Amino acid sequence: MCGIVGYIGEKCACDVLVEGLRRLEYRGYDSAGVALLVDDHINVVKTIGKVSVLENIIHDSKSARIGIGHTRWATHGEPNSVNAHPHTDCSGDIAVIHNGIIENYVALKKKLSCLGHEFKSQTDTEVLAHLIEEFNSRADNLEVAVRLALREVDGTFGLVVMSAKEPEVLVAARRGSPLLIGLGESEKLIASDASALIRHTRNVVYMHDNEIAVVTRNNVSLKNLDDETINREAEYLTFNLEQIEKGGFDHFMQKEISEQPETILNAFRGRLKDDEGIATMGGLRDVEDKVTNAKRFVIIACGTSWHAALVGKYIMEQHARIPVEVDYASEFRYRKPVLMEGDVVWAISQSGETLDTLAALREAKRAGVPVYGIVNVVGSTIARETDAGVYIHAGPEIGVASTKAFTSQLAVLNLINLLVSRKRKTLDAKQGKEIIEEMHRLPEKICQILDQKERIKEIAEEFRDSRNFLYLGRGVNFPVALEGALKMKEISYIHAEGYPAAEMKHGPIALIDEDMPAVFIALGHSTYHKSLSNIQEVLARKGKVIVVANEADGRLKDLSDHIIEIPRTLEILSPILSVIPLQLLSYYMAIERGCNVDQPRNLAKSVTVE
Ligand code: G6P
């Protein structure tokens, strides 16, 4: 969602903030702004549009050594320069940036208006600036004013406040939205995401919920909202700058798609016991018995991670013979789910910060069941709040449309399946070894698919003006159809729907005519022959058929307008391969249509509001 960055130190604050905001732009980007302290007053510059626009309109602020910056993804109030952050109080002496939602902002605004405060924007955030102003007139200092103000607030926040009256201090607070503090020498940074501060320092302190930090250039004092001091060790960030740069590619999405041979290798690294035909994961070692003896798995996730969870259901029910339920986190948290002894809840999240997933896992913890994570971002809130878990090690994913994180989630779900199935003896060592052998072959097979990008580009050229797409798959490749359709919608703005192929007859078939392309995933596994019939049904209605098929499948060549061939592998591993042509198809389609691939309209990488 919104990106937050704050700086205090000896460098030009404006340059640090703008560079940080650029790295955060993928989180949310309808508008951007900074507040910089220049000659004892706060200079606020904000605009609708990109950080590059902002950069061009900041003048005369180069002397500032303290400031805050924000990229916004609108929740309350349309995207425009008035609603952009930072927001200020009546005097213009206090500036606030905020990620999250102040749920009682209407009541607070009313109260503050009665006290004479004048509001400029339609945002919930602006009430924070006025509320802090109100308390600041009575409190000893900014820290106390922020603490008192936050007692009045319902909702979520990751926020940073500065005051012209206290030019050596930034105050940050968190409840529900991520914040971390970078500890440089004679400088400190505050950001919602490590990528915004890694250029300056790798030593960071992650803030937890209900904490407030008073940050000066030489010191950080961390307390809870009840004013009790908290001592927390700094952590060291291990990812490098190249990982968050495009490295010669036109787009992050393109780079991330092409990284998949390596990211799959990283997901498996050190976790496969070839001789025993079993997987091992350090993060689950202490809870292995609970996992293998579980009576049921419940997986909660959102978006692409939810599609990965669905693949997990197919795999684990087939092999480990554990009942698996998959729930949208947003539904799970509000529908009073029945959780029982013996249940194990898994939360899957690339960012580790998705608010609904976080709230759902807290709900599950309250019910007393163990909750484990499958997460990409190391140190993220979901990674910290789960009882145990597995990192997918895909490295930073910047493109809003998730690609490499999806395949790495599938890789880890396969590892868990292998561990559990072998422990429960639903798979023997020989079968386990066969799976591992195939796992080792995946990176090479992914390279073979990536080599076909020109062919996929041609297909995108042909269908660039299509207004609808249908994605059809069966079994373990049904969730891949959903994921293919999601990718198409997200970055090409083409309406696309995913269906289990057999369901087509119950509705979607009515849509098929010569203008409707249908993308089938039809691999040589259990439901192959059924898929052939489904393809015939589309052809009979003059629909255009694009098939993702196994190499040398002569039958499908005759039955399709376009065939994209992928190497054979085991059915449970096949989604890791079959999704890649669909990622590439949506990527090239977006390019053909002139869409902004990495920053699609209305979407954000990390959804930290409900
Ligand atoms: C957003 C992103 C998706 C992602 C989803 C869940 O919608 O745009 O790419 O799949 O959130 O995010 P998570 O970080 O929890 O996997």
Image (cartoon, rainbow, N blue to C red):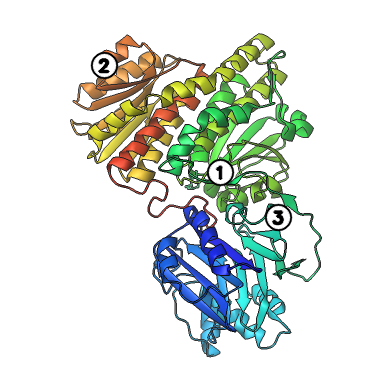
Could you tell which of marks 2 and 3 lies nearer the N-terminus? 3
Q: Quadrant of residue 321?
A: top right
Label 1 sits on a secondary structure element that is helix
Above or below 215: residue 107: below
Residue 261 placement, left or right of 66: left
Residue type indicated by callout 3: Val
Could you tell which of marks 1 and 2 lies nearer the N-terminus? 1
Labels 1 and 2 touching (C-beta < 8 A): no
- In the foreground, 126 or 364: 126
Residue type indicated by callout 1: Glu
* Mark in the foreground, 3 or 1: 1
Q: Quadrant of residue 282?
A: top right
Q: Residue placed at 53% from the left, 49% from the top?
A: 330
Could you tell which of marks 3 and 1 lies nearer the N-terminus? 3
Label 3 sits on a secondary structure element that is strand
Locate residue 567, reporting x and y percent: 44, 17
Label 2 sits on a secondary structure element that is loop
Locate residue 227, reporting x and y percent: 78, 71
Q: Which residue is mark 1?
A: 242
Q: CA distance from mark 3 to mark 1?
A: 19 Å
Q: Which residue is mark 3?
A: 204
- The circle drawn on residue 559 is 2
